[in-house]
Amino acid sequence: MKSSEQRFIDIIGSSGSSGGAEADVETLLAALRDWLASLDAALTAGRIEAGGLQPGCALAQRIGGLHQALAQQHQQREAQWLALAPARALAQRFEGKLMVLVFGKFNAGKSSLCNFLAERFRQHGQAVQYFHLQGGQLLASDEAFHEGATETTARLQGVCLGDGLVLLDTPGLHSATDDNAALTQRFLDSADAVLWLTSSTSPGQVQELDELARELRRGKPLLPVVTRSDVIDEDEVDGQIVKCLRNKSDANRADQEADVGHRAADKLQALGVAAAQLKPAVSVSAYVARSTGADAEAMAGAGFERLYAALLELLAPALAYRARKPAEVLLHHLQEEVEAPLLNQTMPALTALRQQVQEELDSLPARQARLVQQAWREVMPQLADLLEAHAEVADVAAVVAALNAALQQAATQHAQACLDSHILPTLETALELPADLGYDSAPADGLPAAYEKLYETLGAVVQDSLQRMAGDLAERCAARLQALDQALQHKQQIILDGQRRLGQIASLLRGLHAGANQLREPAQEV
């Protein structure tokens, strides 16, 4: 009976099939591209206009800021897609091969495990080719990965095992240099599965999984591997006490594996990752396997027979992910670089804008009343002077003409002050005068005609004129603000519809069981 190791190596050589899912993936890719095109078209058609608002007012400036932010989001997503080009090129370079990310904090034994697996493949007559990324190019190398007690991986490196497996050993996300972490993140998209290495000296540091949250939410299977599962023991050799490494006991390993599994399961649940993606933890000691000859007994004792059995279980979900990877990569780009900024930045900005519009609407009655009051207070003292100036000849027409000019000037000035956010039309006041308007009859002693009743009548006419004019202006401003609010609400609905539709496509991608008729909806719905 073949060992798990031999069966794994045999299967890797024939793992090129993707299960016939190419047609579904292409349909999903088309749906994702359609989604982006429809969303962009809808957002462009739903552009918020600041027409009728003063360019310098707070509302107009905030609308301008919204458009600027949307333009920046577009530029950033284009730049991010370009930044992913090395990862896409890497995936294309190894198309047809299963790509496994070997992940863990520095000193977790990533390089040691990769080297040992490479040795085993070579001993089984399989080709082994190391490589690394330099200057944007993948360069072949004859040297195995350097193994050390400190962070040694300063660049993306990998090894091709046989015809069907690639192990990616990346700079640790917890390493000291930002460049290392950024490099690792950029190549996470290329992987089809993840080996999470955690040292038995401090196993299951689940906070490390935060760095993998995005990848795990994408449906990639995760296999925890407890490395350095060995202890220092003392033995007598030729009468001398010497120290040596031996495997941890089965009970000790089982306890650590169970602990890592439970804590990882709790962490993944908190991250919103499906429990099925987590595979049972396996403990290994590459050092003990190597130092004891790596025969069948040594391999089993060091945990590698169980590791290969776990890798066999990992193949099916990893190959399933590989089949849908092109669509997954595009989906994640759209979720993270298009949808997320719209939901996390644009939606709050739209909500704040709508709140500001509502506050402006709510303030209109008070602004309208203030306009009437201030214009009234400015005009009425002039009315008394006008009536007095024209009392000698009782020239009502001259009084009305001068009063109308004063009213128009005061109304224009105070309308601009009280409704300062709005571009207002040129005001033309027209006093509606009663037919019998005139001064009182002049007294017989030759004194000027009295004008108490005329003052009262013209005061009421001024009041009515101001109320009508202010009401018309407030109505015009309210209509403008309501239209703006509707446009903002429509913009929000565009984003929410886009979120719903992208979620539908994501669900279909997870299953790859839907027909093309389920993937299409009218573009205008987005």
Image (cartoon, grey):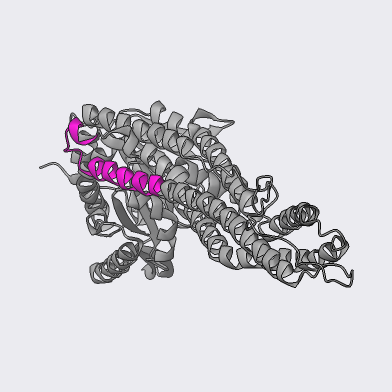
Q: Position of residue 222 (x, y in %)?
A: 31, 52
Q: Residue at x 75, y 72 (%)?
A: 452
Give the quarter of the image for residue 202. Answer: bottom left
In the rendering, at what x and y percent does residue 350 appear? 50, 53
Look at the image and say whether residue 27 sits in the magenta stretch.
no
Q: For the point 31% across and 47% down, which residue is it? A: 500
Specify whether 241 is left or right of 355: left
Quadrant into which the C terminus falls: top left
Q: How many marks?
A: 0
Question: Can you see residue 5?
Answer: no
Q: Position of residue 120 (x, y in %)?
A: 31, 40
In the rendered structure, the answer to whether residue 141 lies left or right of residue 220 reads right
Question: Considering depth in this image, is 361 or 439 the residue closer to the camera?
Answer: 439
Quarter of the image where one finds residue 40: top left
**Toward the viewer: 414 or 519?**
414
Query: Is residue 142 left or right of 290 when viewed as pictured?
Result: right
x and y, in percent, of residue 431 in the image: 66, 54
Give the residue at x 68% y 47%: 428
Q: Is residue 236 above or below residue 277?
A: below
Query: Quick one: 395 or 73, which is closer to the camera?
Result: 395
Residue 24 appears in the rendering: yes
Foreground residue among 426 and 399: 399
Residue sitting at the far left? 1
Dominant SS in magenta: helix
Q: Does residue 499 show up magenta in the picture?
A: yes
Above-or-below relation of 161 to 113:
above
Image quadrant for the N terminus?
Answer: top left
Which residue sits at x=24%, y=37%?
A: 9
Residue at far front of view: 444
Q: Is residue 448 left or right of residue 75?
A: right
Q: Report the span colored magenta.
A: 493-519
